[in-house]
Amino acid sequence: MRISVIGCGYLGAVHASAMAELGHEVVGVDIDAAKVAELAAGRPPFFEPGLAEILTSATASGRLRFSTDIADAADAEVHFVAVGTPQSAGTNAADLSYVDAAFAALAPHLADGALVVGKSTVPVGTASRLAELLAAVAPQAEVAWNPEFLREGFAVRDTLEPDRLVYGVRDPGGDGRAASVLDRVYRAAIEAGAPRIVTDYATAELVKVAANAFLATKISFINAMAEIADVTGADVTALADAIGHDARIGRRFLNAGVGFGGGCLPKDIRAFTARAEELGRGESLAFLREVDAINLRQRQRVVDLAVAALGGQVHRKRIAVLGVTFKPESDDVRDSPALDVAVQLKGLGADVVATDPEGIENARARHPQLDYVSSTREALRGADLVVLVTEWREYRALDPVDSARLVAGRRIIDARNVLDAAAWRAAGWELRGIGRP
Ligand code: UGA
């Protein structure tokens, strides 16, 4: 099929490459000329495992092109809109200006029967508003909403092998045209057994934010348990293992620590709360404010543990911060708890030395005041305190005996509860986890 993808960020660049990998003819459009040039040369402008391989092969095959000119999308039968919906400056609501601009820019170029498919995460009600707008200026086209559930770090696999497909269509009981077009796009996934849910616009929009709200709630739930464990001497990891054996609860997303960050969970729960308030149902989602508050408290908790580990004297103390991205296998530092902790410690007067396998460039662009080093050993050298805040494999595998030889003081905060506490203590380290005795 001929497909366009409008917006080539973490979502769009992966979607465009994956669609070409499936055999479609794809054009990716973005207003950022530098990003388009990189992508066109087959180089991912960000770190995502497996993306370079499919991007290079698809651009070399000629099935994938990139452009800054939306007119180059005119031939496509299906247009995916994958632009960002960040938090608005000064409010909790989503900023829809990029989505609105993408629809407005596409409208004059839509062929007869074109399907415009929203992938961006939007407040409920957006799809029907945009469908009405499009009906006035491009009645030959139709709108569908097809939320994306990919995780950074697994984005290529999640796109090629989605665990479900959700189509929000204008009339779920109607002719089924939009759904059958999407079925052709996703034929490979459907044949592989991916469940497919065809529903109305509002439900599709809500599925996306409900999923992220549930995941955020699960993480804050276990972090709240960690807070109680901290004052009672209980162990939150054993608690998570024990409740996780209940299939109704499940062990995944029950890792206590410095909390969630990234470009999705934090802003999505805030935008969802703001939308509920607009709809007069603020009380229904009031708990998400608590989820957010518990989450932000974890960052403070890690800073407090660091200060306590140094006996209250942080000024001029050398602190090695391991990790700046919001999770491993990503270079994304948007709303990163790790970076937030590093910045707060620096603000308290510590000599912070931060390191990360992939995130340093993005972190430096946002926080040039921190010192960054690319090697873990260099970060550890002479440190009075080590704070592990992003659980990259390399940090999980650190050897406590070898690391002890590098530091000035054997103190470590395991803000992701991933280290073998007994082994580290046996090597003479003072180790503090989150919600662990
Ligand atoms: C999240 C969702 O998982 C995806 O399904 C969704 O498509 C995506 O947002 C989106 O809306 O685009 P992502 O932001 O890539 O994906 O990251 P997650 O794997 O969900 O992790 C989010 C944060 O939660 C990370 O900071 C991670 O460290 C933290 N986390 C995760 C915990 O603190 N504890 C856990 O047990 C699990």
Image (tube, helix red, strand yellow):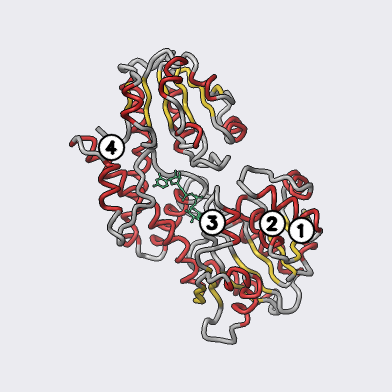
Quarter holding residue 405: top left
| Residue to which mark 4 is pinned | 435
Instruction: Report, in whole angstroms, how far the alpha carbon at label 2 lies from the one at label 1.
Output: 7 Å
Instruction: Report, in whole angstroms, how far the alpha carbon at label 1 lies from the one at label 4.
Output: 48 Å
The three-letter amino acid code for the residue at tag 1 is: Leu
Relative side of 140 to 267, left or right? right
95 w.r.t. 146: above or below:
above
Of label 1 and label 4, which has the lower sequence position? 1
Instruction: Report, in whole angstroms, how far the alpha carbon at label 4 lies from the one at label 3.
Output: 29 Å
Relative side of 432 to 1, left or right? left
Of label 1 and label 3, which has the lower sequence position? 1
47 w.r.t. 99: above or below:
above
Residue at left offset 64%, top offset 62%: 81
Of label 4 and label 2, which has the lower sequence position? 2
Q: Mark 2 falls on what kind of element?
A: helix
Task: For ligand 1, tell me if the residue under mark 3 lies within 8 Å.
Answer: yes
Question: Looking at this view, is 83 or 48 the one in front?
Answer: 48
| Residue to which mark 3 is pinned | 150
Instruction: Report, in whole angstroms, how far the alpha carbon at label 4 lies from the one at label 2.
Output: 41 Å
- Crowding near the residue tagged with mark 3, few <14, some 14–19, many ≥20 C-alpha atoms within 10 Å: many
